[in-house]
Amino acid sequence: MPSDKVIKAMFGQATDVSGK
């Protein structure tokens, strides 16, 4: 889903630690 990409782009830096 594109939502994940959008969220990652918006919160990419914020969720960079959590996302990774």
Image: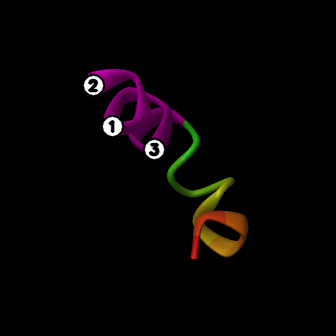
Residue occupying the point 57% across, 57% down: 13
Segment tinted magenta in the rendering = 1-10
Q: Which residue is mark 2?
A: 2
- Left or right of 6? Residue 12 is right
Q: Position of residue 1 (x, y in %)?
A: 30, 26
Q: Which element carries disc 2, helix, strand or loop? A: helix
Vertical order, 4 against 18 (above or below): above
Mark 2–mark 3 distance (CA, rounded to whole Å):
10 Å
Name the element at disc 3: helix
10 Å crowding of disc 2: few (<14), some (14-19), many (20+): few
Residue at mark 3: 8
Q: Amino acid at mark 2?
A: Pro
The image's mark for residue 5 is 1
Where does the image place residue 19, in percent across and percent down from the top left? 60, 64
**Model colouring:** rainbow
Tell whether 3 sits left or right of 15.
left
Q: Amino acid at mark 3?
A: Lys
Q: Are marks 3 and 1 in contact (CB under 8 Å)?
A: yes
Q: CA distance from mark 1 to mark 2?
A: 5 Å
CB of mark 1 within 8 Å of CB of mark 2?
yes
Query: Farthest residue in the front direction?
Result: 1
- For the residues labelled 3 and 1, the Cα–Cα distance comes to 5 Å
